[in-house]
Amino acid sequence: MSDFYSFDGEMDPELRRALRTCLTPTQARRLEFLLRAEKLETIGHMDGVSKQAVWGSIRRALKKLKSDYRVLEVLCDLYPEAGLDARILLEVANAYSQEGLGAA
């Protein structure tokens, strides 16, 4: 997850922009904290909610991200050595969901 952040601790600006265009502000902020390895309890304390509420918010955010082409494009751009493209990732994510394997 550290690849999402620069040496000065800032999230990649393209990834941040992609997250903020498809998630609610609360979901984007909580996911950013989670990617920085903050504990759910800590995030909940900052927001005045339980860790269960934080986890629910993050799960909904991940569900949205699973099918957001913009975020997938940014991730592919961040990891060109993987040789993936957003279209392939989206097809795999959709197939995974349809088979019920992605249900949590």
Image (spheres, rainbow, N blue to C red):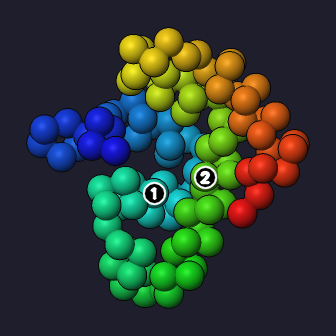
Percent x, y for residue 96? 77, 40
For residue 15, what is the image quadrant?
top left
The secondary structure type at the circle numbered 1 is helix
Q: Are marks 1 and 2 in contact (CB under 8 Å)?
A: yes
Q: Is residue 14 at all visible to an observer of this figure?
A: yes
Under mark 2, the amino acid is Leu
The residue lying at 77 percent from left, 58 percent from top is 103
Percent x, y for residue 86? 61, 21
The residue lying at 18 percent from left, 46 percent from top is 9
Q: Which residue is mark 1?
A: 31
Number of other residues with Cα within 10 Å of mark 2, as a class: few under 14, some 14 to 19, many 20 or more: some
Q: Is 78 situated left or right of 91 in this image? A: left
Comes first in the chain, label 1 or label 2: 1
The secondary structure type at the circle numbered 2 is helix
Under mark 1, the amino acid is Leu
Rendered position, 72 above or below 63 = above
Q: CA distance from mark 1 to mark 2?
A: 9 Å
The residue lying at 34 percent from left, 44 percent from top is 1
